[in-house]
Image (spheres, rainbow, N blue to C red):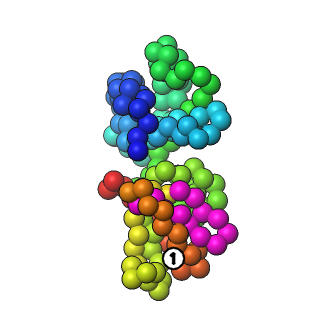
């Protein structure tokens, strides 16, 4: 479920991104963390998205958010680019891409499926947790061969 502030944030972030030759490809507000984390994913429409793109977008968007007073309290702003078909491997990546749509491949198949799609909840020592339309799916890590971002969602 999308946080009610996300549409307002997208409306504010889109012109900021366009001014820089960027595109907003996703916005997630994690209110379960203190302070809340606002993650804005961008893509450079002309070339590979770089660190400079993220830094420029972060500076301008933060100023716009503060001026518009959309975020009532302290928050953390993360601007990044998820990359195309990016495979997740490190613990940091699994934390950074929490809430993103992913495709999990297993071998052998698990509960009759080899490919699972859903939003990444978390990964612990034994399982990976996916949200599939509100249902939590627990996939044993020992069966997982690959986890990558689902760019089609």
- Residue 63 visible: no
Residue 144 pos. (x, y %) = 52, 76
Q: Residue at x 50, y 37 (%)?
A: 29
Q: Secondary structure at mark 1?
A: strand
Residue 125 falls inside the magenta stretch:
yes
Residue 77 pos. (x, y %) = 56, 32
Q: Residue at x 52, y 35 (%)?
A: 38
Relative depth, front residue between 91 and 114: 114
Horizontally, residue 124 falls left or right of residue 69, namely right
- Please identify the residue farthest to the bottom as the structure is shown: 108
What is the magenta range?
Answer: 121-132
Quick check: 65 above or below 54? above
Quick check: 11 above or below 119? above
On the rendered image, what quadrant is the N terminus found in? top left
Residue 129 falls inside the magenta stretch:
yes
Quick check: 69 above or below 122? above
- Please identify the residue farthest to the front as the structure is shown: 135
Horizontally, residue 10 falls left or right of residue 107, namely left
Horizontally, residue 48 falls left or right of residue 139, namely left
Relative depth, front residue between 113 and 107: 113
Question: Tag 1: Cα neighbours inside 10 Å, few (<14), some, or many (≥20)?
Answer: few
Q: Residue at x 41, y 32 (%)?
A: 4
Q: Circle 1 is placed at which residue position?
A: 145
């Amino acid at each position: 479920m999308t946080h009610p502030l996300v549409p307002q944030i997208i409306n504010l972030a889109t012109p900021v991104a366009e001014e820089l030759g960027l595109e907003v490809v996703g916005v997630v507000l994690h209110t379960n963390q203190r302070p809340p984390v606002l993650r804005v994913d961008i893509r450079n429409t002309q070339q590979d998205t770089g660190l400079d793109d993220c830094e420029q977008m972060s500076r301008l968007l933060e100023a716009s958010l503060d001026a518009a007073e959309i975020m009532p309290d302290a928050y953390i702003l993360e601007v990044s680019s998820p990359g195309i078909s990016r495979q997740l491997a490190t613990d940091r990546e699994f934390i950074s891409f929490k809430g993103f749509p992913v495709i999990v491949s297993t071998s052998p198949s698990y509960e009759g499926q080899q490919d699972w799609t859903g939003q990444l909840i978390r990964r612990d020592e034994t399982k990976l947790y996916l949200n599939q339309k509100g249902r939590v799916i627990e996939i044993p890590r020992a069966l997982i061969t690959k986890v990558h971002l689902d760019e089609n969602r």
